[in-house]
């Protein structure tokens, strides 16, 4: 049976090259938005159709990002003509011809030995965003490439290069670069470079918009837009937030209006002639900002009291920047019986069981101060696909621009670049991000207080 995918997908030239490349391992890697994921999914679908009874796995570091991004692309390419069922419980898709595609996460932090892959046998393997996955995962999976499709009894009967590994990646330091990009052709592997200019269907204005978000950072531009691997060790690319994580955190809307007990606010208080910003989260989802220009301390106090009394936000869910005017605002609120949370950037980091558990294997890391810890944890939550950002937020491009301006130093002891430097790079203060970090970190602050009360 041959079903043409062409109404859903017509590869452009680079994608075509990557499809036909006669190698066991093909890395199609480089720029963001250059059609890599679509290539990976289409390639596996094509093979699953051509070889009834074959088995494939599509892998990413985390299930949430896999579902939000890779799987969505996959589903756009198929329909009921070829699919028997999609088992969302066990995350696999069965084709009418008996082929199966499994969707799996490969997170070394959760499953260091990749026991999860124990029983699988595969014909084809796709790892999307391979730079986020450890090399160990690929090494654990390569020997699993031994599943024969229907009608084949012996490996020797299969066509050459039947077993196939498709990798996609964005430029990043690590094994993908060392193994494949730095050795672009070997006996069994090839690296094909992806750039945005290969993509004839990219929407107009996309590049212009990216330029703004990247804020004139040449190194970032080369790395993520031009797909240039040579800059990944450049210090100015030591980003705390990968642009990909930000893109993949975006959700269409705040669909759960219930769960108001899970609302968290972070409040960045105005300095001189500055703005006050309130970030609002529902659980780990950023749902909006409010901006107030030129307001005085008592206006801010009234705004906060309204949030508590009219909107029902718990005072213990509101984190306020405790430097300068913020400190006196917190004191005044406390004087009136509102026990809000104090986010004091320069204090020592929190040391709670919750934080140690959250950091997992990274719990040995030290932080220069609370600010460094809060930023680091937010970055980890982004990487793990736990953060969601509602994409209709008006200030989204400002927030992206601020996230991409944050750099860090240190491996054992993390330090975030100081605010003055960030301010001069951005040409303004990162007010939206500061409010967001506080809203995100509020629950850890509130749990610290609870754990102290229990003691
Ligand atoms: N052959 C094609 N024909 C039409 N549209 C395409 C094609 N390939 C990719 N696209 C579209 O281009 C956009 C980017 O594709 P895709 O998500 O595959 O890129 P990517 O390189 O994986 O990006 P990212 O780095 O963000 O993961 C998507 O909207 C996708 O639908
Ligand atoms: Mg992709």
Image (cartoon, rainbow, N blue to C red):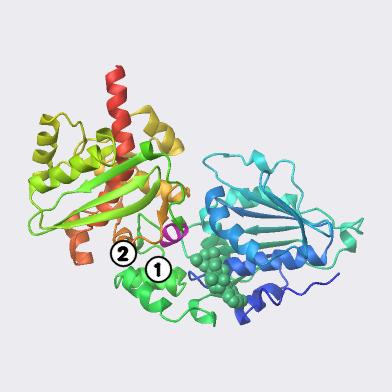
Q: Is residue 331 left or right of residue 215?
A: left
Q: Is residue 255 visible?
A: yes
Please report contact status of discs 2 and 1: CB closer than 8 Å, yes or no: no
285, 127: nearer the viewer? 285
Instruction: Check the picture and name the quadrant holding the N terminus.
Output: bottom right
Q: Indicate which disc residue 231 carries.
A: 1
* Front position in the image: 201 or 215: 201
* Magenta span: 243-248
For residue 117, which quarter of the picture? top right
Q: Residue at x 46, y 61 (%)?
A: 172
Q: Quadrant of the C terminus?
A: top left
Instruction: Establish whether ligand 1 lies closer than 8 Å to the Cβ of label 2.
Output: no
Residue under the image location 9 percent in, 35 percent down: 332
Say whether residue 152 is magenta: no
**Judging from the image, what secondary structure is the residue with disc 1 in?**
helix
- Check the image and report above or below for 127 versus 89: below
Residue placed under numbered mark 2 in the picture: 401
How far across and down, in percent of the image, does residue 157 sit?
90, 63
73 left or right of 207?
Answer: right
Q: Secondary structure at mark 2?
A: helix
Residue drawn at 30 percent across, 62 percent down: 395
Residue 342: image x %, image y %?
20, 36
Q: Could you tell me what secondary structure mostly forms the magenta stretch?
A: helix
> Quick check: is 245 in the magenta stretch?
yes
Say which of marks 2 and 1 sits in front: 2
From the top left corner, tell me how far across and down residue 166 is, in percent.
65, 63
């Amino acid at each position: 049976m041959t079903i043409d995918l062409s109404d859903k997908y017509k590869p452009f030239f680079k994608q075509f090259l990557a499809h036909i490349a006669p190698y066991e391992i093909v890395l199609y890697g480089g720029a963001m938005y250059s059609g890599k994921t679509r290539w990976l999914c289409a390639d596996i679908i094509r093979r699953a159709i051509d070889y009834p009874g074959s088995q494939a796995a599509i892998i990413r570091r985390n299930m949430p990002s896999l579902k939000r991004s890779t799987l969505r692309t996959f589903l756009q390419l198929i329909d009921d003509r070829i699919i028997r069922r999609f088992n969302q419980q066990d995350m696999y898709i069965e084709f009418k011809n008996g082929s199966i595609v499994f969707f799996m996460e490969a997170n070394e932090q959760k499953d260091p030995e990749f026991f999860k892959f124990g029983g699988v046998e595969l014909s084809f393997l796709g790892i999307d965003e391979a730079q986020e996955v450890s090399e160990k995962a690929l090494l654990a999976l390569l020997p699993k490439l031994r599943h024969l499709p229907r009608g084949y009894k012996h490996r020797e009967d299969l066509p050459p290069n039947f077993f196939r590994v498709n990798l996609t990646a964005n430029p990043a330091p690590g094994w993908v670069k060392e193994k494949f990009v730095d050795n672009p052709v070997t006996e069994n592997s090839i690296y094909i470079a992806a750039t945005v200019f290969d993509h004839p269907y990219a929407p107009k204005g996309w590049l212009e918009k990216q330029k703004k978000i990247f804020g004139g950072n040449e190194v970032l531009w080369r790395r993520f837009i031009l797909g240039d691997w040579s800059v990944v060790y450049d210090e100015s690319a030591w980003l705390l937030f990968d642009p990909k994580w930000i893109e993949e955190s975006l959700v269409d809307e705040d669909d759960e209006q219930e769960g108001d007990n899970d609302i968290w606010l972070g409040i960045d208080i105005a300095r001189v002639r500055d703005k006050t910003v309130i970030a609002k989260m529902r659980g780990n989802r950023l749902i909006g900002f409010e901006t107030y220009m030129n307001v005085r301390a008592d206006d801010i106090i009234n705004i906060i009291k309204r949030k508590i009394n009219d909107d029902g936000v718990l005072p213990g869910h509101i984190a306020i920047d405790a430097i300068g005017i913020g400190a006196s605002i917190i004191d005044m609120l406390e004087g009136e019986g509102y026990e809000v949370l104090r986010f004091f950037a320069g204090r020592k980091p929190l040391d709670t069981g919750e934080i140690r558990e959250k950091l997992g294997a990274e719990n040995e890391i030290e932080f220069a101060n609370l600010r460094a810890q809060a930023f680091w944890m937010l970055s980890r939550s982004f990487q793990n696909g736990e953060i969601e950002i509602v994409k209709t937020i008006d200030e989204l491009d400002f927030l992206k621009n601020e996230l991409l301006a944050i750099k860090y130093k240190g491996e054992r002891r993390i330090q975030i670049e100081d605010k003055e430097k960030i301010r001069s790079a951005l040409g303004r203060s990162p007010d939206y991000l500061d409010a967001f970090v506080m809203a995100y970190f509020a629950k850890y602050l509130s749990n610290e207080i609870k754990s102290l009360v229990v003691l």
